[in-house]
Image (cartoon, grey):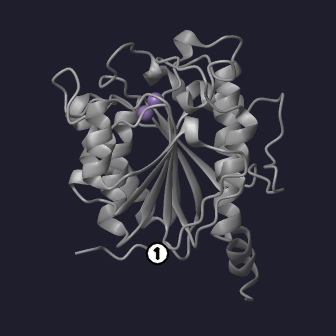
């Protein structure tokens, strides 16, 4: 049974960090990402306005809840689920910073407990659909296999994929995943959804030239602009949350990837404010007038 979460009357966006990288398969380091994305986001070198002209320095729009400390493997997942559940109960739309991509599974579990039906738009160089990877079913290579086999969503659309192999192709077919591979993507590709939407952004979807600070460099990806444009052109009745994961500061150069992540967070937040009409709701609350 679903709990009744006041998603229609949100308190704004909650920004939270999950510094967990134990489920990374190749390199650790993504756990150090959240504070550096935040540092870039709140840096004096930029302003807090989104390109669609919302001021995220308004705490009624964006509230920073900080990072959840001491994440170990399973307790970490429980803490993530609990954190997201608490945020939803407060009417906050969760925007989560990874950490590796394994964090998306507990986030989506918490959403599933609260929201009856939603779809997922997933930007990534990798489909992350392995049944298990290096004997770890909770690996960052597996979250969307877990999500699909638990039927936490009926609709998963993956974009930017350029590492599909035989096993993951079979998994995608078995789960009915829509995979838009990088080789098939064309400029102007739009995304329209009829039910509430969750957005997961693995920053390795960007070309390593735009985001070198990731554990798995996969050339031939999107420019920052192409990703931003796709986010800005999303159409959906409601956005119930988003994540930006897999930033690995150990491989970053001059903070380029940290700032790319901050920019993606800003544009995701701008889209959430726009689609969920948060500004209107906040004004209505303060004046009492609809
Ligand atoms: Mn991923
Ligand atoms: Mn990836």
Which residue shows up at 34% across the image and 22% down it? Answer: 24
Image side of residue 77 versus residue 50, left or right: left
Image side of residue 243 versus residue 64, left or right: left
Occupied quadrant, residue 260: top right
* Residue position marked by numbered label 1 in the rendering: 6
As drawn, 260 above or below 265: above
Image side of residue 9 versus residue 22, left or right: right
Q: Which of these two is toward me, 226 or 198?
A: 226
As drawn, 286 above or below 159: below
| Residue 75 showing in the rendered view | yes
| Residue 79 showing in the rendered view | no
Occupied quadrant, residue 109: bottom left
- Estimate the x, y position of residue 65 in percent, counting from the top left: 53, 45
Occupied quadrant, residue 58: bottom right
- Estimate the x, y position of residue 257 in percent, counting from the top left: 65, 23
Residue density around tag 1, few if under 14, some if 14–19, many if 20 or more, within 10 Å: some
User: In this view, which residue lies farthest toward the left?
Assistant: 135
Which residue shows up at 34% across the image and 63% down it? Answer: 154
- Estimate the x, y position of residue 121 in percent, counting from the top left: 50, 52
Q: Quadrant of the N terminus?
A: bottom left
Which residue shows up at 56% across the image and 27% down it? Answer: 35
Image side of residue 166 versus residue 207, left or right: left
Q: Which of these two is toward me, 186 or 22?
A: 186
User: In this view, which residue lies farthest toward the bottom?
Assistant: 289
Q: Which of these two is toward me, 225 or 274?
A: 225
As drawn, 17 above or below 215: below
- Estimate the x, y position of residue 206 in percent, counting from the top left: 62, 30
Q: How many numbered dots are placed on residues in this image?
A: 1
The image quadrant where one finds ligand 1 is: top left
Tell me the element at label 1: loop
Which residue shows up at 68% across the image and 71% down it? Answer: 277
Q: Quadrant of the C terminus?
A: bottom right
């Amino acid at each position: 049974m679903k709990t009744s979460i006041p998603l229609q009357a949100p308190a704004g966006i909650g920004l939270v960090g999950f510094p967990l990288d134990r489920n990374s398969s190749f390199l650790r380091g993504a756990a150090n990402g959240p504070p550096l994305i935040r540092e870039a986001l709140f840096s004096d070198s930029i302003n807090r306005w989104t390109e669609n002209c919302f001021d995220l320095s308004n705490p009624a729009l964006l509230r920073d809840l900080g990072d959840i400390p001491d994440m170990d493997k399973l307790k970490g997942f429980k803490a993530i689920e609990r954190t997201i559940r608490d945020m939803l109960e407060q009417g906050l739309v969760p925007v989560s910073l990874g950490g590796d991509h394994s964090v998306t599974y507990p986030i989506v579990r918490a959403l599933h407990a609260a929201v009856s039906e939603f779809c997922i738009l997933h930007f990534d160089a990798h489909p992350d659909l392995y049944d298990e990877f290096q004997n770890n079913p909770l690996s960052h290579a597996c979250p969307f296999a877990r999500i699909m086999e638990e039927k936490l969503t009926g609709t998963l659309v993956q974009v930017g994929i350029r590492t599909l192999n035989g096993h993951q192709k079979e998994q995608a077919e078995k789960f009915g995943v829509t995979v838009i591979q990088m080789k098939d993507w064309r400029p102007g590709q739009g995304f329209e959804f009829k039910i509430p939407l969750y957005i997961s952004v693995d920053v390795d979807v960007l070309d390593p030239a735009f985001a070198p600070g990731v554990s798995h460099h996969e050339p031939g990806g999107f420019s920052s602009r192409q990703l931003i444009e796709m986010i800005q052109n999303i159409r959906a009745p409601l956005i119930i949350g988003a994540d930006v994961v897999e930033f690995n500061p150990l491989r970053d150069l001059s903070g380029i990837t940290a700032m790319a992540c901050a920019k993606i967070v800003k544009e995701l937040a701008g889209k959430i404010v726009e689609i969920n009409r948060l500004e209107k709701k906040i004004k209505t609350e303060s004046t009492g007038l609809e």
